[in-house]
Amino acid sequence: MRHLQRYPIWRDANRLLVEIERAVRGFPRYHKYTLGSELRRQAMTICRLISRAISDKQRQYHHLERLKLAVDDLKTQIQLAKELQVFSSFTQFQTLSELAVAVGRQSGGWAKRLISNNPKSPSVTEGGVC
């Protein structure tokens, strides 16, 4: 896992996971085990997808497409949590939102670079299906 630390997207996703853990700890009990569990699960999924995209070069584009969708889902959940007023402060919401946006931008840029570096690759043009 140490080799992942050199990737900025991994560092941001890891920080996002840690910040979500901290935020969920302070959720009201009603939301802690529903929305809180979903936020934690989605953040863990994002970290897993990044790890797979880094290590599985054959299906990298496929993992990046799934990663972009997972980040969008997480952003929706963060917004819902804000509307339900479960964060202890606006700063907590802002931090999570900024990290989610940063991970989303990085994953989108990574996918674009992958396509531009290898535009004729079947694994990229067919959505990473091998």
Image (cartoon, rainbow, N blue to C red):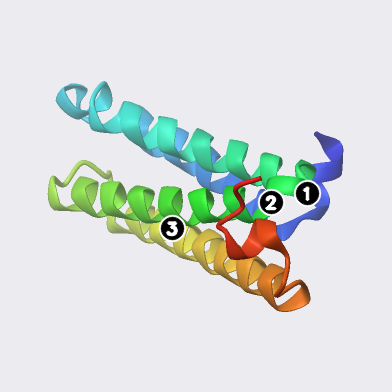
Q: Quadrant of residue 113?
A: bottom right
Amino acid under disc 1:
Lys
Relative side of 47 to 84, left or right: right
Residue position for label 3: 95
Amino acid under disc 2:
Gln
Q: Residues within 10 Å of mark 2 (few under 14, many from 20)?
A: many
Residue position for label 1: 57
Relative side of 45 to 110, left or right: left
**Considering only order in the chain, which callout, 3 or 1, is on the residue closer to the N terminus?**
1
Quarter the C terminus occupies: top right
- Is 33 located above or below residue 93 in the figure? above
Residue position for label 2: 60
Q: Could one spot residue 26 in this view of the protein?
A: no
Relative side of 99 to 52, left or right: left
The residue shown at (52%, 34%) is 44
Foreground label between 3 and 2: 2
Q: Could one spot residue 60 in this view of the protein?
A: yes
Q: Quadrant of residue 115?
A: bottom right
Q: Are marks 1 and 2 in contact (CB under 8 Å)?
A: yes
Dot 3: element: helix
- Is 100 located above or below residue 63 in the figure? below
Q: Residue furthest right?
A: 3
Kindly report the distance in space between the C-alpha atoms of the residues bearing marks 1 and 3: 31 Å
The residue shown at (30%, 50%) is 78
Residue 83, given in percent of the width and then of the height, sits at 14, 52
